[in-house]
Image (cartoon, rainbow, N blue to C red):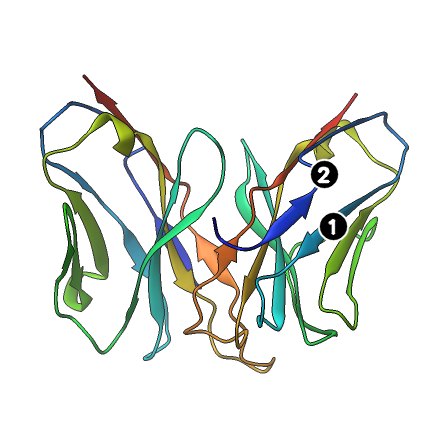
Amino acid sequence: DSGVTQTPKHLITATGQRVTLRCSPRSGDLSVYWYQQSLDQGLQFLIQYYNGEERAKGNILERFSAQQFPDLHSELNLSSLELGDSALYFCASSAEGQRNSPLHFGNGTRLTVT
Amino acid sequence: AQKVTQAQTEISVVEKEDVTLDCVYETRDTTYYLFWYKQPPSGELVFLIRRNSFDEQNEISGRYSWNFQKSTSSFNFTITASQVVDSAVYFCALSAPLGLSSNTGKLIFGQGTTLQVKP
């Protein structure tokens, strides 16, 4: 068990809808990352927060947004969903949020858009 | 540009065989970090190892060993006496470059190698 908790495990929704994925990092970790895993794109970095502030941004669509709250949990909001957004979304956390910090991943949220 | 290449898409071995998963990376950084992760059929990503670019010593952990060669930009992973429980997708990853933005722990992943160990 990595100590990173993601909810829900599975989500099925329709095109055009909006969903929120939730992540609780490991105890003591200040940094949270979001990754998208799809068959064609592999593991793609979306965004990183460190202690409530955005630290790095990847290929995150404008329809997607994230935030990290004072208690350090994070939410990833996906709106105007399209079929192509179907993927496994991972949250990861690390202590310092820097290059030498291993990321510890949650079990992922599998999103299916129909 | 930062890039990680895992040329082997799928490997199939019989239990007790040794198997090596290849990883080749590209970076302009002089200091960087390399990682291996395992994704079993259940889907979670499990951290296996981290190496920094200044430490080229090979590492062994039980049946797992890693060979880091800076001269060939490779960080290969060997499983000795493979077992069915080793069946998974294995990812090699590289730390993002230092740049104008803050030091970040974001990782660049290879496409993964699916290892199937048959009994």
Q: Which mark is residue A22?
A: 1
Position of the C terminus of chain A by quadrant: top right
Which one is nearer the viewer's eye here, A20 or B29? A20
Return the chain for callout 2: A
Query: Circle 2 sits in a helix, a strand or a loop, which is it?
Result: loop
Is residue A22 shown left or right of residue B64? Answer: right
Residue B67, compared with residue B99, is above or below; it is above
Q: Which mark is residue A104?
A: none
Locate residue A20, reporting x and y percent.
81, 45
Residue A74, compared with residue B28, is above or below; it is above
Query: Residue at the location (72% across, 38% down)?
Result: A8
Is disc 1 on the same chain as disc 2?
Answer: yes
Residue that badge 2 annotates: A8
Using a 10 Å C-alpha cutoff, classify the residue at mark 1 as few (fewer than 14 neighbours), some (14 to 19) or many (20 or more): some
Locate residue B91, reporting x and y percent.
37, 46
Query: Residue at the location (49% across, 35% down)?
Result: B43
Using a 10 Å C-alpha cutoff, classify the residue at mark 2 as few (fewer than 14 neighbours), some (14 to 19) or many (20 or more): some
The quadrant where residue A79 appears: top right
- CB atoms at circles 2 and 1 under 8 Å apart? yes
Amino acid type indicated by mark 1: Arg
Amino acid type indicated by mark 2: Pro
Mark 2 or mark 1: whose residue is earlier in sequence: 2
Which one is nearer the viewer's eye here, B81 or B11? B81
Query: Residue at the location (88% across, 39% down)?
Result: A18
